[in-house]
C-alpha cells in the first residue's frame, strides 16, 4: 500500500515535474522568440536575441552621434525619452523600416522605430537610414519635403542599396514614371507611385551633396523650409536658376552617367567621419547607367502621417508583401 501510494505519488510527482519542465521550456522558447531587450541612453531595443539587441542599440547610438555631426556639424542632445526600436532579424527577411514621430509646437517626440532584415543589412543600411530621419526631425522640428528626406537618408545606406536605387531610377525614367521636379519639390507626403520618389530623391540628394557637402544640403533645406521658395534656395546654395532648371541640369547629369563633380567642387566636400567609414559606409559611386534618359513626367499623390517608411518601397520593389 505504502508502495502503491508511493508509486502513485511518484507518477504524480514525475508528471508534475515533466509539466513544470515543459512550462519552463515553453516560457524560455517563447521568451527567446518574442524578444530580448537592451537599453541605451537614447534607445530601447527589442530584438530576437540579447546579442542582436545590444548590437543594434550600440550601432544606433553610434550612428546618432556620427551622422548628426556629418549632417549638422554637432551631436544631437539627449532625447527626453528614448526611442523604442523593434527589430525583426532574419537572414531571408527583406530589408525595411519605418520611423514615426510627432511634431508639436516646435518639438518632436513619440519616437517609434521598427526595422527588419538580415543582421548585416539592418546594421549597414536600415539603421543609418532610419536614424538619419530622427536626426532631421530633431534638427528641423518640422516635416521635410519627402524627396529631400528620403533622398538624403538613402545616401547613408550601403553602396549596394544605393546602386539598386540608381538602377531603379533608370528604369523609372525610361518607363514614364519619373516625377517632374516642380511636383516633386511640392510633395510633402508620399505619392501613390512611391518608388520613383525614393530613387529620384536619392539621385538629386547625391548630386547636391557631391557638389556642396552635407552641411550645405542642410542649409539649403532649411532655407527652402523657411521661405517655401525652393527656386531661391537652389539659386542661393547651388547657383541654379530655379526648380525647372535644376531638373534640366540633373537630368543631363544622369544622361551622362552621373559623372563625379569637377575636382574643385569635390575637394570642397569633406570626407565622411572616421566612425562612419569604420562601419564600411561611404560615398562610393553608383554604377553608371546605360542608354539614354527621356524627360521626366509626373504622377501625383498623397498619403498621411509623419511616418518615414522604408519597407514599403523596398518590398514592393521586390514584389513581396508589405506588412505595414
Ligand atoms: Zn526613409
Image (cartoon, rainbow, N blue to C red):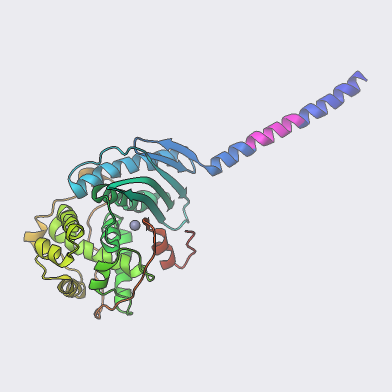
Query: Between residues 102 and 194, which one lies in front from this camera angle?
Result: 102
- Report the number of discs: 0
Q: Which secondary structure is most common in the magenta stretch?
A: helix
Ligand 1 quadrant assignment: bottom left
Q: Give how far across and how far down residue 312 sits, in percent.
A: 42, 62
Specify the farthest residue to the top: 2
Residue 98 found in image quarter: bottom left
- The percent position of residue 185, horizontal first and vertical second, equals 24, 67
Identity of the residue furthest to the left in this view: 264
Residue displayed at 14% across by 55% down:
216
Q: Is residue 196 above or below residue 151?
A: below
Residue 114 x %, y %: 43, 50
Pick whichever, 279 or 306, lies toward us.
306
- Is residue 20 located in the magenta-colored stretch of the structure? yes
Q: Is residue 180 left or right of residue 189?
A: left
Q: 16 above or below 222?
A: above
In magenta stretch: residue 183: no
Q: Residue placed at 54% from the left, 43% from the top?
A: 34
Residue 96: name its quadrant. Answer: bottom left
Amino acid at each position: 500500500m505504502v508502495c502503491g501510494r508511493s508509486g502513485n505519488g511518484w507518477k504524480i510527482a514525475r508528471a508534475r515535474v515533466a509539466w513544470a519542465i515543459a512550462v519552463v521550456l515553453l516560457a524560455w522558447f517563447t521568451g527567446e522568440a518574442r524578444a530580448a531587450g537592451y537599453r541605451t541612453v537614447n534607445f530601447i531595443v527589442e530584438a530576437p536575441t540579447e546579442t542582436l539587441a545590444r548590437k543594434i542599440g550600440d550601432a544606433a547610438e553610434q550612428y546618432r552621434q556620427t551622422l548628426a555631426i556629418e549632417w549638422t556639424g554637432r551631436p544631437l542632445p539627449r532625447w527626453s525619452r528614448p526611442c523604442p526600436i523593434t527589430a525583426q532579424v532574419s537572414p531571408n527577411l527583406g530589408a525595411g523600416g519605418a520611423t514615426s514621430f510627432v511634431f508639436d509646437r516646435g518639438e518632436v517626440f513619440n519616437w517609434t522605430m521598427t526595422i527588419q532584415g538580415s543582421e548585416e543589412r539592418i546594421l549597414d543600411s536600415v539603421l543609418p537610414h532610419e536614424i538619419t530621419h530622427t536626426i532631421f526631425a530633431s534638427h528641423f522640428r518640422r516635416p521635410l519635403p519627402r524627396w529631400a528626406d528620403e533622398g538624403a537618408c538613402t545616401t547613408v545606406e550601403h553602396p549596394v542599396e544605393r546602386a539598386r536605387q540608381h538602377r531603379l531610377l533608370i528604369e523609372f525614367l525610361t518607363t514614364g514614371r519619373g516625377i517632374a521636379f516642380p511636383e516633386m519639390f511640392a510633395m510633402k507626403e508620399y505619392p501613390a507611385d512611391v518608388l520613383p520618389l525614393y530613387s529620384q530623391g536619392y539621385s538629386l540628394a547625391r548630386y547636391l551633396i557631391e557638389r556642396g557637402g552635407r552641411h550645405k544640403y542642410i542649409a539649403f533645406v532649411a532655407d527652402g523650409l523657411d521661405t517655401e521658395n525652393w527656386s531661391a534656395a537652389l539659386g542661393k546654395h547651388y547657383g541654379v536658376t530655379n526648380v525647372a532648371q535644376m531638373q534640366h541640369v540633373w537630368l543631363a547629369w544622369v544622361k551622362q552617367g552621373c559623372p563625379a563633380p569637377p575636382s574643385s567642387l569635390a575637394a570642397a566636400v569633406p570626407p565622411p567621419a572616421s566612425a562612419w567609414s569604420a562601419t564600411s559606409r561611404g560615398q562610393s559611386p553608383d554604377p553608371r547607367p546605360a542608354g539614354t534618359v527621356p524627360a521626366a513626367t509626373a504622377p501625383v499623390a498623397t498619403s498621411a502621417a509623419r511616418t518615414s517608411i522604408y519597407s514599403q518601397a523596398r518590398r514592393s520593389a521586390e514584389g513581396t508583401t508589405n506588412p505595414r
